[in-house]
Amino acid sequence: MKFDFSHIDVSKGLSQIPEAFKIILDTPAFILKHQLWKGFWDHKWVLVFSIVVASLFTYTLYNNIHDYFIPKKEQSIDIDINVEGFDEGIKAIEEAIANSTDEEEIEDLEEEIEELQEEKSELKGEKHKPLFSGSLKFLLLIFLEVLIFHFAVRTNNILKNKNKVLEFKEFKNAQIRMIKVMGRKWVYGLIMYILISIICGITGTGFLKDIIMFLIYGYYLGFAFLDNYLEQFGFSINESAKCIQSHFGASTVFGVFTSIVMLIPIIGPLIVPFLCAIAATRYGHDSQMESFKKAKEVIA
């Protein structure tokens, strides 16, 4: 399989970071000026659904964060558990493996090591899900795609001086597309997590793994907002992917901002689709991202 990254300019991508950040800061004033919330509140079912989704997301997210930092109650006891015995046992088994030539015996000993490591982790309360997992955030964007697409189209109407009125079919197509996009990114995120874990393990930089994955998931989240802009210009998902890759700096900024704002209980998950959909659309307009496909056609 041949990969073409000729459309990616690293220096240009890095220069997009302050541009995207500035647009995010300017977006609240843009919202106030054009009163973008008007009309949306007429759809009461969307409002109720959004609040329910935001509440469930907040509950699940904070449970995960709590479990990450605080061991479960059944693990919380009043005495210190000495896990040095596990380390000594594992070391002894490793020495036995080194001195053994029997393949079956080696396999049995390796299984014993795995069991000891699992027991040790359970006692120390270290068996946690990655704190910066993107799965929950991907699901939130899927559920709130109605809001994202609504504000992306309305913002584009203002910027392009259009009067596009969305129909149910367009909302349905946007929802299906968001599921496809986030499904792909979930798979890519899993692959990247495995690769980054291996690389960090080899290089002894495990402490960087969560930070790197946080940025990668940030790029994928920002991708969703920018894709909503390009979708309005007939971009396929693959065409959109190439265009957004050349705007990786902006995409990462929108995604990281999304991850941070989501941490605000209930309000955060509601603000994110509203604010970032508008900010990403403004960035797409200012950067003329829709011209990417035309430029590629001319080159071809």
Image (cartoon, rainbow, N blue to C red):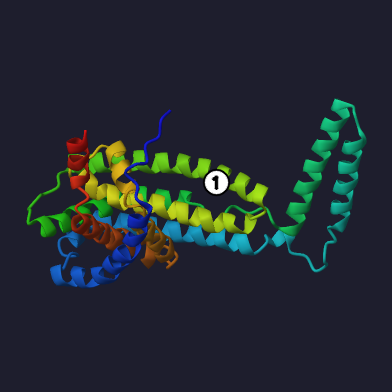
Residue matched to label 1: 193
Give the residue drawn at x 40%, y 34%. 3
The N terminus lies in which quarter of the figure? top left
Question: Where residue 194 sits: x, y (%)?
Answer: 57, 43
How crowded is the residue under tag 1: few (<14 C-alpha within 10 Å), some, or many (20+)? many
Question: Where residue 131 sits: x, y (%)?
Answer: 55, 57
Image-based side of 97 in relation to 199, left or right: right
Image-based side of 31 in relation to 265, left or right: left
Question: Where residue 300 sits: x, y (%)?
Answer: 21, 33
Q: Nearer the viewer, residue 236 or 289?
A: 289
Q: Which of 206 and 151 is in front in this view?
A: 206
Dot 1 falls on a residue whose secondary structure is helix
Give the residue drawn at x 42%, y 43%. 185
Q: Can residue 53 be seen in this view?
A: yes
Identity, as a three-letter code, of the amino acid under mark 1: Tyr
Image-based side of 116 in relation to 20, left or right: right
